[in-house]
Amino acid sequence: MALITLRRNLCHLSDFRIHGALAALKSQPVNHVHKAVRERLRPWFSSLQPEPFRVRFHHACCKKFHSENGNDLHPVGEPVFSQVHDLDSFEQNLKNMDEEIFYSRLNSFTSSEEVLSFINTLQTLPDTMAAAALQRICEMGKKDGEQGLPKEILENHVFQALCVPFEQEPSNLSNTALVTALQALTLLDVDPQSDLLLNLVAECQHRLQRGGLEVHGLCVLGESLIKLQGPGCATLDLVIYQLQGEKLENFHPEDIVALYRILQACTEKADQHQTFLNKINNFSLSIVSNLSPKLISQILTALVALDQTQALPLVIKLGKYVVRHIPRFTNEELRKVLEAFIYFGHNDRFLTTALEQHVASLCLTLDPEVVSTVTEYCSRKQILSEPILNAVAETFVCQSEKLSPSQIAELIEAFGKLNYLPPNASDLFRKLEDTLFTHFNSFPPKTLLKLLHSCSLIEHHPVNFMAKLYSPYFLQRLLGEESHLDRLSLAQLTQLFLTSILECPFYKGPKLLPKYQVKSFLTPCCSLETPVDFQLYKSVMSGLIDFLGGRQYFASKVLTPYCYTIDVEIKLDEEGFVLPFTVNEDVHKRVALCIDGPKRFCLNSKHLLGKEAIKQRQLRVLGYEVVQLPYYEIEMLKSRLELVEYLQRKLFSQNTGICW
């Protein structure tokens, strides 16, 4: 392992000699040295003003020194460390320092300045530790919103000396030090043509071609090349090729995740790597228990990007460990995890319980993106979680200004879809109305339509905004550059208009023009109704035939003039007799049978979805006698006779004698 001398004379390195640097400094007057140094450093900072700062590393030996003798050099403006101070400093010679202590100290620092001060007290430094120090400086030295290190760090003599061996003789570095230094520089907006970067990349390529890099080094090099040269570089293909030749048993869990990240960056080549991906997916099942929350999030993100729908066993196992780590995820990690579960359609009750506890405990401190994603997860999976929805409602009431229009719509859509009103519903909709009055034009048209339609599902009708919805101006905005409106937008407009007629008779504003109205809410895609469950439908049909005495006494899948499709319609005369479905005269009552399968309810519950609730509610307003036949009641019946008796109870509970 190479040792780098950092103490006192920073221009001399134990294994990396910089010949002539000291002599050049000694042979010139101090003023001349300062002028030469300024000229040498100018390229480093040429882009500081006015453009964003970019780092370009040059030889660290050319820095601001003044000296009274050749053996006692000190940087200008830096404190002179006495011999006593050097002897008292923390383990000056790392030959006697335990590596674990060094890395522990390194990770405890909170600023680049602390790292440099610590390094300044050391006499020698192994190249792997020097690379680790460089990486730590690059991680912490970036200021908010900047991609480069601050000028004071770049001009620091310790930092410059630290970079010398990596630039001048990278061939003498160990593999670990080489790839770690390269990885550190990728954290910054480094000039791709800097000598330091070019030399490191060239040496990595040389060792790669000789097959001299081990698994970890290959993974670090692969990710560094993606950041520096993009996923299309030829060297990256060689890295992946060599990784394919390694036994996965030799990979640490961190390297497996790095491999996923590398392949994630090459999504256009996913088909070429699918066989390799299958091996990784299968092997990863054995390491899930060793993964941190961060690594779990990264694997799930990669599986989504690579469209690994065949890796469901891995997703399910990762899901089990996600439940354990919910409180330990960062906001961003949790958002990525939930997005992956939405993508793969994964959910389980333990995950829901863990999310309920987490969201409820951090109600008003969660990031808006996380609140939105958690709500979307419940909405997409049709999970009626009262603790989560109550917390979401409270978050909106207290922090609506932090939410974007799309996030607000996502939140309200969940309440409408799941047919749920929180305890603070009055405060929720009052806040929503205030927000809409203030920022109405900030909402994209389709987002606004989706939001207001969701309100109507749970009987909070947006009467104050209906006139704006039906105005030519809004409809033109909704149309945008398209030649016609999409089917879902037309259906939502139609249902809102129907709601204004049936449930808001006091509304006297503009009407929706017929050309914007649909004939049916039940369509193959973007439907506002859930199609009837076929097996459940067949079972009920056979029972009705036995009960009523023939198929002619009921009609199925009847489209009403009000766009709704009734599963089964039965007509009765004034005396309660069943009429053939072909008869249209003397019809006193119409019975609408709603054969409600599991998909019409929230997940694992007996709570109707919002679109089914509004359908049944409005059918009653239209004069239908709505009879609900839920799957959980029908599935309890053990014989055809029990089914007939069940239908008699549901249809004619007050008429024991039926004639037809």
Image (cartoon, grey):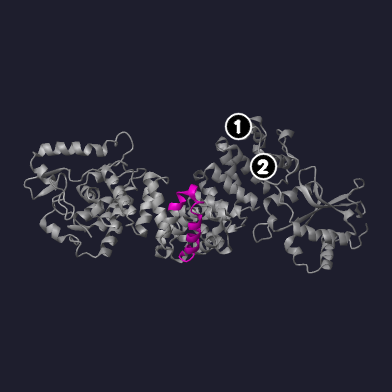
Position in image of residue 168 (x %, y %): 22, 48
Magenta region, residue range: 262-287
Position in image of residue 114 (x %, y %): 25, 53
Kind of residue indicated by mark 2: Leu
**Lower sequence index among marks 2 and 1:** 1
Position in image of residue 195 (x %, y %): 26, 43
Quarter of the figure with residue 211: bottom left
Q: Which residue is mark 1?
A: 481
Q: Residue at x 32, y 50 (%)?
A: 205
Asked if residue 279 lies in the magenta stretch, the reply is yes
Q: Which mark is residue 631?
A: none
Count neighbours of disc 1 (C-alpha within 10 A) and say few if under 14, some if 14 to 19, many if 20 or more.
few
Q: Residue furthest bottom?
A: 638
Secondary structure at badge 1 equals loop
Q: Is residue 1 above or below residue 270?
A: below
Quarter of the figure with residue 576: bottom right
Q: Is residue 587 above or below residue 514?
A: below
- Tell me if residue 585 can be seen: yes
Q: Is residue 188 above or below residue 594?
A: above
Q: Residue furthest front?
A: 210
Count neighbours of disc 2 (C-alpha within 10 A) and say few if under 14, some if 14 to 19, many if 20 or more.
some
Structural distance between the alpha carbons of marks 2 and 1: 17 Å
* Drawn side of residue 85 relative to residue 242, left or right: left
Q: Which mark is residue 488?
A: 2
* Drawn side of residue 455 relative to residue 351, left or right: right
* Drawn side of residue 462 relative to residue 273, left or right: right
Position in image of residue 208 (x %, y %): 34, 53
Asked if residue 614 lies in the magenta stretch, the reply is no
Q: Nearer the viewer, residue 218 or 588?
A: 218
Q: Main secondary structure of the magenta part?
A: helix
